[in-house]
């Protein structure tokens, strides 16, 4: 039978849930965050090369996915809660400051983590999903591209529709992209589909969540934004427009020949980008806090 | 020698064996499944699961596993055939024959077996891959012996399910042999690259000396089958067999002469030929401590495409006996024997009619097919046996199974 697709090394109880994770290597810590509907396994091609390059690589299954807890209520997937999972995990592992790398929803978490806790972030690398402040309102094109996000909103209804007729609709949405077979296998497990969709239900979409909070603190860490030309769901402007929220050094990479799942479609390029970027620059100075009289 | 005990030992991990392991463990019985292959690989078996088989899979709780393994809902059947112009072929919507099931599924057989076996293992079944030299002793306390690597193992079970398919390994060992008859031959190949073939649509028709089938599996993949007269057996062996097989999908009956198949298809599995054999039990399918299920309990001609569905039905009926009866005596399985006898009588009858219609070749057979088509167009009731691949056999109207009906269907003048 198919060998289990897991590289997990351990699990901890933090923030009210069990978070399973990979913790491998020694050196400056790098935290790799997956998105929807993935697990740590998204990063399988990057973990060992980064370990060999001298990093301690920490890769969780975020709540709702993989081997981590899957609360069934929507409130459990609020962005702040999700960010706190990562704070709790890194604290438990004795990690103060880390390089943060995220893809898809994982990128949204990484952005938020970076501007809320600048001191805990060394370098930030975000794939596919731009800064939440980019769109005051998403463009029509962006809305069209991500129609499925709306579809995922209705509890019960979309589970039923996605599963119907042998998961036909899900297969149509995901197509042959990413790890499509693994996604279905994971999502077919009890409670998994609802938990995964709750990410959308609690937050609408990766960049929509924080729209109401206009005054984002700046991102001070050196930041690498990566977007792929084959992304069916997210537009380039989401990433390029992110620069204005970054006060640290900004670098943008446009990747050809890759769909939405860049770490899977261009595994070596992804590793090279990370190896070349992490630890290469220093942060912008934190704005000095003058005491008000 | 290692000895282990369990409630149910299953020999053979095809669709029947794996589904039984998944369902029985989910319901609290302990199961050991012995499969000869080291890993599931494409043996060229059935890959079209009828809507009524989908409903059986749902009852057994293996429908998600089928989707996970790659099962793809096919929605329409366009009845291309040499007796109609491609543009005039009628399209049948297959999604509403069985409520809640949707259309039939195109399944990559071995990947689906793997996914169901994985589910069974997760619910506690012990799955032994690479089990060799299985020997079954029937009796009130049945025993299965096998070898794995260099170890000899003995499994003591309360009951053994024989599910080795048309290998009939268990049946032969316990004195439940089969009669066989061959009607025609066939070959199958799994392919990818059918980007211009509509993945919602299947083809099944006859032209010249071949009966052709295209069953999409989504994402440009499909299972292709050809059936042909026994006199042409072995035509797809040796060098260039796959090329010859694909070239034979150049058919006047298909739109664009089948270009979107023969010019685009790339093999993703072995090409195999087989005789289409009907297996019928000589004495029965149950003895002390042993019950046969799936193909091992008997088949109808593969042209009907219901072997998978039958295997799943067997699993449900046998499992329901195991889960409701305390004593697993041969008498307890009487409902299974009766239901299966009734079912196979209908399927074998229906399959022989379909085979006569679609798998006999030459000018006379073509003329007959043309006449029957005309009759069916005039009176849809004449299509009654075509229902056999959509709905379960007991739901097909009785009149279709009379010699009188068949005589009317095939008679020389309309
Ligand atoms: C070419 C072809 C096309 C077909 N097309 C269709 C179709 O489109 N639709 C449909 O519904 N049906 C179709 N059928 C029939 C369908 O494939 C079978 O009815 C179905 O596979 C039966 O499942 P099973 O589990 O009983 O047997 P099998 O699928 O034959 O599985 C038997 C398993 O037992 C294992 N085994 C065998 N011997 C031993 C042993 N000694 N010890 C341990 N393990 C053993 C085998 O490795 C195998 O995994 C087709 C059959 C063929 C051959």
Image (cartoon, coloured by chain):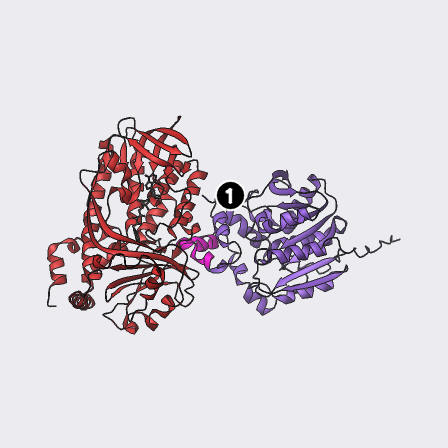
Chain colours: A purple, B red
Quadrant of the frame with the C terminus of chain B: bottom left
Q: Residue at x 32, y 50 (%)?
A: B53
* Residue B75 place in picture, x, y as percent: 35, 61
Ligand 1 neighbours mark 1 (CB distance < 8 Å): no
**Between B263 and B333, the one nearer to me in the picture:** B263
Q: Is residue A225 left or right of residue B74?
A: right
**Between B318 and B254, the one nearer to me in the picture:** B254
Tell me where the magenta segment starts and ends, as one range: A153-171
Could you say whether the residue bearing mark 1 is in a helix, strand or loop?
loop
Identify the main secondary structure in magenta: helix
Q: Which residue is drawn at 69% across and 43% down?
A: A90
Considering only vertical position in the picture, is B235 above or below B8?
A: below
* Residue B213 place in picture, x, y as percent: 31, 61
* Residue B129 place in picture, x, y as percent: 41, 39
**Between B374 and B246, the one nearer to me in the picture:** B246
- The residue carrying mark 1 is A4
């Amino acid at each position: 039978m198919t060998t289990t697709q897991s590289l997990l090394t351990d699990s901890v109880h933090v923030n009210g849930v069990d978070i399973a994770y990979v913790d491998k290597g020694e050196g400056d810590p790098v935290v790799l965050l997956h998105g929807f509907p993935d697990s740590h396994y998204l990063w399988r091609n990057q973990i060992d090369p980064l370990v060999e390059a001298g990093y301690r690589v920490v890769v969780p299954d975020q709540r709702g996915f993989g081997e981590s807890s899957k609360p069934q209520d929507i409130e459990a997937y609020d962005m702040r809660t999700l960010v706190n999972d990562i704070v709790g995990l890194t604290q438990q592992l004795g990690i103060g400051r880390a390089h943060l790398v995220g893809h898809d929803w994982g990128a949204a978490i990484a952005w938020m983590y970076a501007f809320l806790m600048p001191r805990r972030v060394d370098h930030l690398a975000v794939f596919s999903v731009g800064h939440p402040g980019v769109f005051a309102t998403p463009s029509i094109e962006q809305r069209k591209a991500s129609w499925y996000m709306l579809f995922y909103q209705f509890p019960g209804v979309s589970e039923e529709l996605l599963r119907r007729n042998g998961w036909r609709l899900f297969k149509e949405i995901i197509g042959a992209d990413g790890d499509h077979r693994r996604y279905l296998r994971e999502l077919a497990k009890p409670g998994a589909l609802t938990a995964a969709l709750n990410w959308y239900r609690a937050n609408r979409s990766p960049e929509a969540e924080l729209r109401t909070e206009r005054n984002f603190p700046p991102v001070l860490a050196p930041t690498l934004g990566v977007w792929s030309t084959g992304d069916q769901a997210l537009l380039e402007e989401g990433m390029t427009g992110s620069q204005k929220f970054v006060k640290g050094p900004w670098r943008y990479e446009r990747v050809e020949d890759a769909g939405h799942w860049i770490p899977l479609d261009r595994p070596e390029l992804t590793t090279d980008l990370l190896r070349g970027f992490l630890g290469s620059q220093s942060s912008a100075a934190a704005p000095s806090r003058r005491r008000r009289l | 020698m290692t000895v282990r005990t369990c409630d149910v030992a299953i020999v053979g991990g095809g669709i029947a064996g794996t589904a039984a392991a998944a369902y029985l463990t989910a319901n609290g019985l302990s199961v050991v499944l012995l499969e000869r292959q080291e890993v599931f690989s494409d043996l060229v078996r059935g890959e079209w699961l009828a809507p009524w088989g989908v409903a059986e899979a749902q009852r057994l709780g293996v429908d998600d596993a089928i989707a996970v393994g790659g099962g793809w809902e096919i929605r329409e059947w366009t009845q291309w055939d040499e007796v109609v112009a491609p543009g005039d072929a009628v399209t049948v919507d297959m999604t509403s024959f069985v409520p809640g099931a949707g259309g039939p599924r195109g399944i990559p057989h071995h990947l689906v077996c793997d996914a169901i076996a994985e589910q069974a293992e997760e619910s506690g079944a012990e799955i032994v891959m690479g089990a060799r030299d299985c020997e079954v002793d029937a009796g009130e306390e049945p025993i299965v012996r096998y070898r794995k690597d260099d170890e000899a193992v003995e499994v003591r079970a309360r009951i053994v399910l024989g599910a080795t398919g048309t290998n009939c390994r268990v049946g032969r060992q316990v004195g439940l042999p089969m009669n066989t008859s061959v009607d025609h031959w066939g070959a199958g190949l799994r392919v990818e690259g059918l980007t211009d073939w509509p993945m919602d649509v299947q083809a099944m028709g006859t032209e010249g000396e071949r009966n052709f089938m295209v069953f999409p599996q989504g994402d440009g993949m499909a299972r292709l089958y050809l059936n042909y007269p026994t006199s042409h057996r072995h035509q797809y062996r040796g060098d260039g067999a796959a090329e010859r097989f694909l070239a034979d999908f150049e058919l006047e009956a298909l739109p664009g002469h089948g270009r979107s198949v023969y010019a685009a298809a790339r093999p993703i599995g072995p090409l195999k030929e087989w005789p289409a054999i009907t297996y019928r039990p000589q004495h029965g399918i149950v003895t002390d401590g042993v019950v046969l299920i799936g193909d091992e309990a008997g088949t109808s001609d593969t042209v009907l495409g219901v072997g998978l569905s039958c295997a799943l039905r067997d699993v449900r009926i046998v499992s329901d006996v195991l889960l409701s009866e305390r004593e697993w005596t041969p008498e307890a399985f009487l409902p299974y024997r009766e239901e299966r006898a009734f079912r196979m009588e209908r399927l074998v009858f229906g399959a022989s009619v379909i085979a006569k219609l679609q798998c006999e070749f030459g000018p006379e057979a073509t003329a007959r097919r043309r006449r029957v088509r005309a009759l069916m167009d005039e009176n849809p009731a004449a299509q009654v046996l075509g229902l056999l691949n959509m709905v379960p056999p007991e739901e097909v109207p009785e009149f279709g199974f009379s010699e009188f009906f068949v005589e009317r269907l095939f008679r020389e003048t309309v």
